[in-house]
Image: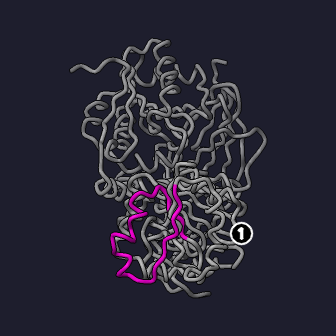
Amino acid sequence: MAQKRGATLKFPIRLGRAAWNVALAALLFLATEPAESRGQSSDKAAAPPAVFGPEKGTLVICGGGILPESLRGKVVELAGGEHARIVVVSTASQTADTPDIETYVAWWRQQKLAEMTILHTRSREEANTERFIEPLTRATGVWFMGGNQAWLIDTYSGTRTEAEFHKLLERGGVIGGTSAGAAVMSKMMIRRGSPTAEVGRGFGFLDGAVVDQHFVRRMRQDRLLKVVEQHPTLVGLGIDEGTALLVQGRRLSVIGESEVRVCFARTESREALVESLRSGDQVDLGALCRVALTRQQPRMQRLLAPPQVSEGTLVIVGGDAVPNEATERFVAAAGGTDATIALMSIDGESSETADAELMDRLRRVGVKSVQRVEVTSRQQADDPKLAALLKMTGGIWLCGARPDSFVESCLGTGAEQLCRDVLRRGGVIGGTAAGGMMQGDYLLNASPVPTKRALMDGYDRGFGFFPGVAIAQNWQKGETPSEFTQFQQENPQVVVLGIEESTALIVHGHAMEVVGKNQVAVLNGASDSAPSKSSVLQAGDRYDFKGRVRVGRKESE
């Protein structure tokens, strides 16, 4: 059947849990680039563990201490509010077998719930009985009290009770816990010990990470760093008191009063790394695992070619507004209005409106064949149907807001190679936002966690269509962020291009031309032939990367 002109082509893949874990392992294998494309070895790493929290349910992992009412209230809300059926597991508490337990469950007694049950035993035999698990079979939420996490695991692991916890999540329920009730959430658990921890099996609601609690208050950072150093493919999640981490699939969200610290192990070539998340921050656990895996590889010397685009043309836009001249130059470089042009969308359905506007813009300048393809997974990026579709394309526009999505979906895949093929045919690659940043060699500010570091392991490499260059979007006039200054000092051979909004670069050979309304900053480190210097380019200016000098406006002007 003929493809409707301008329609979106998708390559849907529907996977169950087991198959998706295999797919994620492939996604995070870190096949960052074909070795022959840049004359250096491609990175390798062992496949990661399954890095998901619950696919349907939610974890509310609290760091202990005095909890804001909103944290336990979140469990009630997710469990169904007044319709919630909550099971409070008190086994970790020293008071579980005494009347004093009522003091610790009073808050739950006061809530307007459809049902509330206290569950406790010290007997594994009882934990396997139908009578004991019966409240769990109809529960919509479970809360683990604090105390001794080893008592929870030693009593319930491998029993029908543990199986019911997992079933609750599978049907979309919520499991929350504080202190010891937080520690048991991960597949590997810290059982006891400080400053050196004893680890063991947890319930495994969360894989790819190990959880520690009371983190800042009890100064447990060194303890967690020692754990991840012994198990370096795991991400350490240190949750402070009064704070919670919500886990839904791969998404981690912070709520509460303090912070969650993300800890990566010290390796032979890298120091330990700790980043802080505050309330409102969200991160992707799959992305964090990619960072952890990348850090296990030896740090390789990157062999950079001189900044030039010897085949084809690049159009790199700073921000979402594409200058009219950039659109016209893109179409001309693609072969004119009769050429076939494709928009490669990495954000999928979330960017359909913006992508449609760009397609309309291309049609208004006369392009007859424009089609949009979604490439939101490595499976799609390597699909032979994509290669067949794009083999005659004169130009590809890379659409996507998040550079980490490009890294995970496309870096080192057939989709990247298809873009290189377009350039080898003398065509053009364009890009806005992340689609522009990815065209450089180094990838700046693409970290999956909030940080002031310019580079993050696993997210520091672009496609390298423009070698020897790092591209910064939405550059603010007259400002050079401190992380870029530090990056330049550490990597003087790399040219940093800061592109303001509504401005674009047209690059071919050693020459770069600026079009649009605003400016481009060229931060040029020292080279063998020239000292360090910087330039500011206006629309119409050109820059020669061979001599690393501004050569002024086009002669026609």
Q: Amino acid at mark 1?
A: Ile
Q: Is residue 73 above or below residue 542?
A: below
Tell me where residue 146 appears, x and y as whole percent.
Answer: 59, 75
Residue 250 can be seen, yes or no? no
Which is more toward the observer, 517 or 9?
A: 9
Quadrant of the rendered image containing residue 455:
bottom right
Indicate left or right for 129 with 294 as reference: left
How many numbered marks does the figure carry?
Answer: 1
Which quarter of the image is occupied by the C terminus? top right
Q: Is residue 380 magenta?
A: no
Tell me where residue 198 appears, x and y as whole percent.
Answer: 50, 86
Residue at the (58%, 50%) spot, across then down = 77
Residue at the (46%, 31%) spot, across then down = 397
Tell me where residue 130 appears, x and y as whole percent.
Answer: 33, 69
Quadrant of the rendered image containing residue 259:
bottom right
Return the residue at label 1.
Answer: 66
Tell me where residue 500 appears, x and y as whole percent.
Answer: 68, 35
What is the residue that sits farthest to the left in this orientation? 1
Q: Residues within 10 Å of mark 1 (few under 14, many from 20)?
A: few
Q: Is residue 119 magenta?
A: yes
What is the residue that sits farthest to the right in this orientation? 478
Secondary structure state at the residue bearing disc 1: loop
Q: Is residue 545 above or below residue 255?
A: above
Residue at the (66%, 74%) spot, across then down = 214
Indicate left or right for 300 with 389 as reference: right
Indicate left or right for 439 with 516 as reference: left
Q: Is residue 111 above or below residue 543?
A: below
Which quarter of the image is occupied by the N terminus? top left
Magenta span covers which residues?
Answer: 115-144
